[in-house]
Amino acid sequence: MEIMIRIEGLTKSFGKFKALDNINLHLQQGQAISLLGPNGSGKTTLIKSILGLVIPQQGTITIDGMVIKKDWTYRAKIGYMPQIGRYPDNMTIEQVIRMVKEIRKDQKVHDEELMEGFGIEAIKNKTMRSLSGGTRQKVSACLAFLFSPDIYILDEPTAGLDPVSSELLKEKMIKARAAGKLILITSHVLSDLEGIASHIIYLQEGKLMFYKSVEDLQASTGEQKLNKVVAQVMRTQLPAMAH
Amino acid sequence: MLLDLFRNKIILIYTLILAVLSVSVLNLDSNPSKGLLSLLNITLLFVPLISILFATIYFFNSIEFTELLLSQPIKRKKVISAQYLGVAISLSAAYALGVGVPLFFLVSGIASLVLVVSGVLLTLIFCSLALLIFVKSKDKTKGIGVAIVVALFFTLLFDGLLLAFIYSFSEYPIDEAVIAIIAFNPIDLARVLMLLQLDTSALMGYSGALFKKFLGSATGSIFSTVCMMLWVVLPLVFSLRIFRKKDL
């Protein structure tokens, strides 16, 4: 499998605080990676560095062969779903979607499966102000999946979604992974990632603690359920790794 | 983005208030020139403050959407310029409609046109400054605080300092220096630009008289217009440059 995201020696500090400390990662096609770590461990900074929202002091990020510092067009390969989706209050759903389509107008084929599943068509004339948090989350998800990108970056995708929509989104993630896409998910709800995540990246205090496949972790811990696996790893292996 | 702003209730209310003020001020006085002066004072006092506050708050409130847009294949410069244009155009349109339309029907003439132009220029300038504040500051509360301080500095404090300067150096030939200093306050520039049009030298004040004496009406107008344009462009250029490297 081809390497889609190559991160080398990535370091980012805000003042004295080191948000990311010499991170090296090679992420491949067909992987669904769960990005874990306590609050403030650098998960968001890592995602934002990949998206080019945060500019790191050291290190390089290469997306599908493009060094992101030099070339902004690489973002056409990424679909991003932010944790908090806030949109201009007075725009309707349809206007927001049309605006993003306008930005990516060289991509003619649109994947509107999620929009149909969530029933966005029926509420497309509502303004963003009038939407509930969950509905806004649905709009964010639709936007991330609209252009069938090679890489999906989903920040807490299922938080705030109702069970039906959450299942729909999960099915969509599984399909995308089967189609050979790379999915990067941060989520604290580990049970939601059951059957989706193929790999786990664990960050702590800006350092990469481990990057392993779920099978390896299941074998080494003897547990099957994802949340038990992670709990077990945190109890037994992390203290050993820290020293 | 523009669509969002045109439907913004605050912009609508701003337009209406300006319109009501213009009509009532112009009807109050039989002398149109006096009416224009009152409108000028209203403009100089409120337009900078409202523009800078509204624009700063808008930039900070749309930060999540800005992030979403920046995660699309689009240049940073394009996103931030679109935001600036959206805010600046809608606030300018509000001013042009609110003040321009009543003026057109009640006191049409060159002087009215100049008032509308200087009001629009002030709007553009203070939106530029708001953008600079936005890219320089990390959080919303601080940003809004700085915006208020900047607006008050130019509306109130600057003139006080200028007066103190003129007072303490009154024995020296400082006329040119005063003209140069005025170029550093966009609000004074707008005042001078307008007063050069109205032939009310008594009301022109020290700075206006200086402009007329040294530069003449025509050169004075061109000088202050050019300075105001610089006030629009320079903060904008700085903002774009800083935003290129900003962490979001």
Image: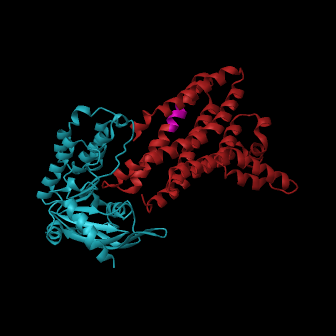
Q: Specify the quadrant of the image occupied by residue A197.
A: bottom left
Secondary structure that dominates the magenta span: helix
Q: Is residue A180 left or right of residue B105?
A: left
Q: Is residue A83 visible?
A: yes
Q: Is residue B157 left or right of residue A233?
A: right
Report the residue that reaches farthest toward the right: B171
Which chain comes out cyan in the rendered image? Answer: A
Q: How many marks?
A: 0
* Magenta region includes residue A209: no
Please tell me which residue lies in front, A176 or B98.
A176
* Magenta region includes residue B93: yes
Which chain comes out red in the rendered image? Answer: B
Q: Specify the quadrant of the image occupied by residue B36.
A: top right
Please tell me which residue lies in front, B74 or A176.
A176
Q: Position of residue B24 (x, y in %)?
A: 64, 22
Q: Is residue A41 left or right of residue A170?
A: right
Q: Which residues are magenta?
A: B91-97
- At 68% across and 36% down in the image, what residue appears? B197
Q: Position of residue A67 (x, y in %)?
A: 30, 69
Q: Is residue A182 visible?
A: no
Report the residue that reaches farthest toward the bottom: A243
Quarter that holds the C terminus of chain A: bottom left
Quarter that holds the N terminus of chain A: bottom left
Report the residue that reaches farthest toward the left: A178
Q: Position of residue B210 (x, y in %)?
A: 77, 47
- At 43% across and 51% down in the image, what residue appears? B80
Q: Position of residue A65 (x, y in %)?
A: 23, 69
Would you place residue B237 above or below residue A94 in this image? Answer: below
